[in-house]
Every structure is written in C-alpha cells, then in structure tokens.
Image (cartoon, helix red, strand yellow):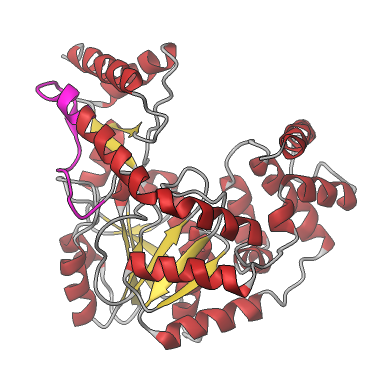
Amino acid sequence: MSARLRASRCGTASVAMSSGVIGGLADIRRVDASFRRVYPQIRSFCPPSSEAERALADLLKASLDRREVVLTQSGTAALFLVLRLLAEGRPFAPEVILPALCCRAVYYAALAAGCRPVLADSRAEDGNLDPASVEAALSPPRTVAIVAVHLYGRRPPLEALHSLAERESIFLLEDAASALGASSFGPGGAVVVSLGRGKILSAGGGGAIATDDGDLAQAVRNLTADLRAHHPTPTEQRRFCLPIVAWGAGGRGPWPWVDWAAAHAPRALRWWWSQPMSAWQVERALRRWPSLPARVARRMQAARRYRALLSGSAVQVLGAEDADGVVWRLPVLLPDGQARARAGRLLLTHGVFPAALYEPLSRVFPQAERAPSLAVAEGIGKRVLALDVSPRATDERIALTARLLREAAAKSP
C-alpha cells in the first residue's frame, strides 16, 4: 500500500467517524471523493485484463479441482450470486440450510438473495455442520440448498452432506472462504472462496465460484451483467457508500451497513455484490499465489505447536488435525464462559488480541428459523476462542498465548 493511500485512509476514517450517523454527509460528492481515495481500485470497478483473469482462474481451477471458475467481488458476493440463482423464479421464499456456527456474512448473503435462512446444529467434535441436524431442518420442496462452511478452514463432512443433498435433490454449496489451499473438496455442487483481508491468501478483496457445471457458470455471468445495470439513487449512494468508506479506512465492521442495505436498499446491495474483482486485486493474487503452500504449511506448524503446548491442560483444541484441510484460525474451548472471559482479559493485558469467533447466529438473529436443537453450536459459542496462526504468530507469541490460556483455565472451579 502506498503512503498516499495510507494517508487517505486515515483522513477518511476521521471524516467518517466524526459524521456519527449514516446520513451525516449531505454532500454526495464528498462521500464519493472519499470513497475513491479509500478504494480507488474497487470504486472505479476497473476490470482485470482477460489474460490476468484467465491466469488466476486457471490457478483456482487446479486448486479447487473444478472445470469452471467465475471471479467475484468477494467471497460473500460469490455466495449471494449462487443463492440468488437458486431463488429466482420461485413462487415462495426458498429455504437455505446454514450452520448456526459461522460468519454472519453467510446469513446476509442468503437473506439478500431472497432466501430464508434455516440454522442447523454443529458436530461436537469439530464444530462443523451436523448432517443429522441438517436432515431434521429440511422441509422439501422449500429447501433448495445446503451451505457447508469449512469452519476455521476445517473440512466439513462433505460426503454425508452430498449424499443427503443428492437424495433430496438439493444443491450443495461449499463455503471454503477460509480454506483456500486445502487438498480436497467435496463432489458436485459449487465451491466459493475468498481472497479478502485476513484470509489465507489475501488480495485485499475478491473471491470466486468454482463448479463443474458450465451452465451454472454461464448463468452466474448473465446474472452479474443484469444486476450491474442498476444505478443506485443519490439517497442510496449517500447512505450506502459512507459505511464502506469507514470500513475501508479501518473503521468498524460492515454489518450495520449490510443490515440497513438488506432491508432498505436491496437493489443497491445486489449491484455492489455483482461488481467484478478489480485489476489490482487480480494482480495481487497472482503475485502472492506462489506463496500459498508456504502459508498453509506455516499455519499448520503453528497449530501443531499450540496443540503440544496445550496438551494435558483444561484448554481443549476443537477438532483433530485434518490432513485434507487447512487452519485459518485454531479454535480452542475454555472450560466455561467465565474462563473464556477471563482468558480474553488476560490476553489483552499482554498485547494479545483474542477473537471470539464465532458467536452462534441464533444469538445474532433470534428471529431466524432453526433446527429443533442448536445445543452443540450454542455450547461451543460460549467457550470458544479462535487463535491466530498466521505468519505474525511467532514462537514467542504462541508460547505466551498458550501459557496465559492454561493459567486462565486452571482458575475455573
């Protein structure tokens, strides 16, 4: 990132934060100018060259073992586009089965696509989607898809989910946003990945849909062309752009903006998610691609070190080591919610920033439909911390984090 862009991000952050409310900037041109400074490569929607796009698509095809790849604006956009296709032309709001334990972006993508999210429970051994709970949540013919999330990068039970989806004639969509670099993916359906900030291979944004179905890939391309034809109104532009400016400048997360847009400006939200991956992002992904195996290996090594240091303690590493998967973050379970809160405070005092990922979606969206029981997902959500295993996690930081976690867990009754 250039010094000029860094300075513009800082300047925009102060403007956005001082405005207080979404509609605080009356002058649309000021919003648009700030937006261009923060994300010039996205706001201009400068598409990549066909040669660069083909090169990245070929790499993703080989990595995901699929014949067709469509590049998208983000991993969330990829989810939205596939679910939107499944929802089109139906006389009712189709239902989509989601894990109760995952990023809320999955829920918003389904909602914006015109689907009704239905939450299913997790498996106790690794937190991934439980096929038995999925089966209990099905309501044919309303259920049109199952979204199988690779939670923390871990591979879900894809074979069981594929058999269930095939038996009920339901589409299986793999959300592998945190699993790029894994050695295997499930059969059939489609796989979506993310190249966004914080992911295993970050291009600063972008994503992709990978499938063996050529008709599906072409339908996605046609859908994006149709959605891009919408031009946001001045009101949409003012209220829609400002939260993106704040988020891009290092401000708070985009969820309040997405919540507002899904309810009040759905066409603007769909327009945004139909935009292409930019030339800057494609070029960055191509430059970083050769480092992907080393990035995956470093994460696996950090996870193994955590396992060794936490062995024999009251801190439980969630899930066994998976030879087919990757580790985006390492989930650990403290004995109870009080121990997790105590561990969080202790880590913060030593400069370690813990992530309580993920809060069950049943808490975030209490109105959501759900399987008869979400006890496992809600139990994990009360106790889980997701540890950093990125290259920033040095041996010294890993040892310090493990020691503090053991100390916090030992104080539990």
- The residue lying at 14 percent from left, 43 percent from top is 320
- Where residue 105 appears, as percent x and y from the top left, is 47, 54
x 87%, y 52%: residue:
28
Quadrant of the rendered image containing residue 406: top left
The majority secondary structure of the magenta stretch comes to loop
| Residue 237: image location, x then y, percent | 78, 58
Residue 175 in picture, x, y percent from top left: 37, 61
Numbered-mark total? 0
In percent of the image, x 90 and y 48: which residue is there? 27
Q: Is residue 316 above or below residue 197?
A: above
* Residue 342: quadrant of the picture: top left
Picture layout, residue 384 above or below residue 134: above
Which image quadrant is residue 277 in? bottom right
Could you say which is closer to the camera, residue 338 or residue 313? 313
Q: Which quadrant is home to the N terminus?
A: top right
Q: Residue at x 34, y 53 (%)?
A: 179
Q: Is residue 316 magenta?
A: yes
Residue 226 in sight from this viewpoint: yes
- Residue 346 location (% of width, % of height): 36, 13
Q: Which residues are magenta?
A: 306-325
Residue 49 is left or right of residue 388, and the answer is right
Residue 102 relative to residue 30: left or right: left
Nearest to the observer: residue 128 or residue 362: 128
